[in-house]
Image (cartoon, grey):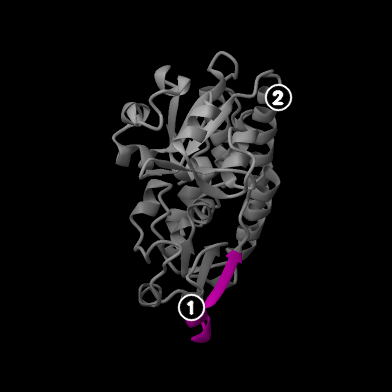
Amino acid sequence: MLTTRFQRRQVLAGMAATAFMMPGVATGSQQHRIVSVGGSVTETIYFLDRGLLLVGSDTTSSYPEAAKNLPKVGYMRNLSVEGVLSLEPTMVLLEEGAGPPVALDSLSSIGVRIEKVDEARSIADVVTKIRRIAGLVDAEGEGDELARTVAARAKAIGEAVAVVDTRPTVLFLLDVKDGALMTAGKNTSVESIVDLAGGRLVFDEFEGFKPVTAEAVQQADPDVILLMQHVGHRLGGEEAVARLPVMAHLRAAQEGRVIAMDGLLLLGFGPRTPDAVQTLARLIHGAAAVPNILEPLRAG
């Protein structure tokens, strides 16, 4: 499997950082106390060996394990101004879509530095995100190396997926309510990750996330049903999802092709995106069709 010099370097850098860094102390010439908003932003900071600069994060920041222990300032789209201010940050580093706008305006008006990171929907976007965050946390060298590592891993798994000659259709289950299923269409992060894994969204005639009827789902009859783990847990697990009235008659449900993945890994488009591609590709195509060539990339 593909290993990286970056992973070996992380161990040494982490040991060195522990020796002289405390939360909020200086790196380079600038002192940082960072509140990170957006799970992929937070995990990128950890991959850059700058996790000790974090004094808080939002509730979507669940990786690595250390991120779960940070003080929380609310959900990324419903941030608490008071919660942010209580942590005395020098910078709030947030992903596109965070808010609400009135909260960000309030923070800016009293002098809190706000830095936004564009949403990523491709490997090129992930590389751009890494370099952008690295520049903000004085980790340009680490950012260059991490960007090269992610690009190389994406190329390796992309080549493995490219030789598979089938493109299974995938139904993404976001929610079920009153018999209707909320699913993903074109120009979404779901479409991007499914495409990278060699699949195709079964509903590709509309954009964004929309409800579809049970009849439309039955007619589409996808090869695979995909959902995030927390949705699966709420609905009672994959087997319970397969028994839902809107799902029960689908081949995918009857044949056990209901897949639940960690939401941040699947849709975060952070440094672990090649890992997500490999995992999803092996699940939708079968382990025999896509080799397990990447060792997990781990932060912290």
Q: Is mark 1 on a helix, strand or loop?
A: helix
Q: Can residue 242 be seen in this view?
A: yes
Image coordinates for residue 231, horizontal then vertical, percent: 37, 42
Relative to 40, 199 lies left or right: right
Q: Which of 219 and 149 is in front in this view?
A: 219
Numbered circle sitting on residue 186: none
Give the quadrant of residue 137: bottom right
Q: What residue type is labelled 2?
A: Ala
Q: What element carries label 2?
A: helix
**Position of 115 relative to 214 (above/below):** below
The crowding category of the residue bearing disc 1, from other C-alpha atoms within 10 Å (few below 14, some 14 to 19, many at least 20), is few
Q: Which amino acid does label 1 sit on?
A: Val
Q: Which of 227 and 241 is in front in this view?
A: 241
- Residue bounds of the magenta highlight: 105-116
Residue highlighted by disc 2? 162
**Position of 122 relative to 60 (above/below):** above
Q: Residue at x 63, y 54 (%)?
A: 129
Residue highlighted by disc 1? 102
Q: Residue at x 67, y 49 (%)?
A: 127
Which of discs 1 and 2 lies nearer the camera? The answer is 1
**Position of 134 relative to 110 (above/below):** above
